[in-house]
Image (cartoon, helix red, strand yellow):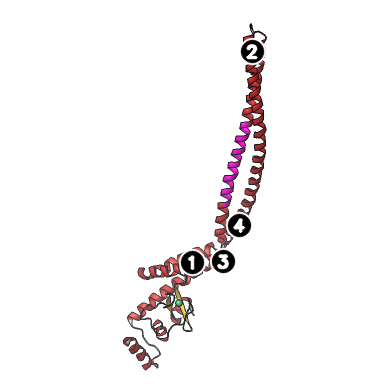
Amino acid sequence: MAKTATKSAEKEAKPAVATKQPTKAESAVAAKLVALYRLQHVDSMVDKIRTQRGELPLEVQDLEDEVAGLETRMNKLADDLKAAETAVSDKQNFIKDAKANIKKYEAQQSKVRNNREYDSLSKEIEFQNLEIQLAEKRIKEGKFASESKSAAVEESKQLFKDRKKDLDLKKKELDDIIAETEKEEKELAKKSSAAAGEVEERLLTAYRRIRGNARNGLAVVHMERGSCGGCFNAIPPQRQLDIASHKKIIVCEHCGRILVDDSVVNEVVGG
Ligand SMILES: [Zn+2]
């Protein structure tokens, strides 16, 4: 505290000195702040592009998931329908065979030598007729099931088609926006990694942590009219002086963002 007081007293003591030379340590911190703010500046431009793109990528993702689900359902219903139709044709073949059997038994009946053989064949014929009746009942049920399944298949096909159309539209919209901003984004990504390369590892980690936690992606903010540019809380006068003096990196006591003064901002955006 005493040291800072001395420093500011010193500053006040020689206001006439127009070209106050910063100490080596001060200029080193200033360079770090400039590098940090440059990185933030580039990353904020990337953020802006992404905000313009908005919820579209998520909407496309949701629609893709939905369409995939509808396709699975449509295929499953089609399989069910096929199975029901196969069951019906199996029963129809069964009836054909049973009718052939009946004909065969009737032919045998005309050649039997006793009543016992005749009765036995009659029982077989009766049994085959019962089987035919049962199969006919199953066919009727199967056809009914097929009809409702086929309606469900048609319905799911239509739904799939509609949602697929929505998806294609949204995808195109997104592709157009991406195409428009892709070049700019690539250049910014290059600039961002170049800027990040100028920031020391420890500060870069802090920057990414603060940026990750901040909703607006701001980790380094401009101190404007004595307030934090991130949370807009007032910064105490002594802290304002510390920020401007570039003796060390100062964070906002409310939101934890790194604060920079006009001179750092101007160095980056060229004001
Ligand atoms: Zn703040």
C-alpha span from label 3 to label 4:
15 Å
Residue 201 marker: none
C-alpha span from label 2 to label 4:
75 Å
Q: Mark 1 sits on what residue? A: 188
The structure residue drawn at horizontal position 60% and vertical position 57%, both measured from the top left corner, is 170
Q: Is residue 153 above or below residue 23?
A: above
The structure residue drawn at horizontal position 63% and vertical position 25%, both measured from the top left corner, is 93
Q: Mark 3 sits on what residue? A: 52
Q: Is residue 77 magenta?
A: yes
In which quadrant of the rendered view does residue 133 lie?
Answer: top right
Q: Amino acid at mark 2?
A: Asp
C-alpha span from label 3 to label 1:
15 Å
Taking the image as shown, residue 8 lies to the left or right of residue 189, namely: left
- Mark nearest the camera among 3 and 1 is 3
Q: Mark 4 sits on what residue? A: 170
The structure residue drawn at horizontal position 64% and vertical position 13%, both measured from the top left corner, is 119
Q: Please state the horizontal and vertical placement of residue 137, each as a whole percent of the image.
A: 66, 30
Which one is earlier in the sequence, the residue at label 4 or at label 1? 4
Q: Amino acid at mark 3?
A: Gln
- Mark nearest the camera among 4 and 1 is 4
Mark 3 touching mark 4, by CB under 8 A? no
Which one is earlier in the sequence, the residue at label 3 or at label 4? 3
- In the image shown, does 184 or 163 lie closer to the viewer? 163
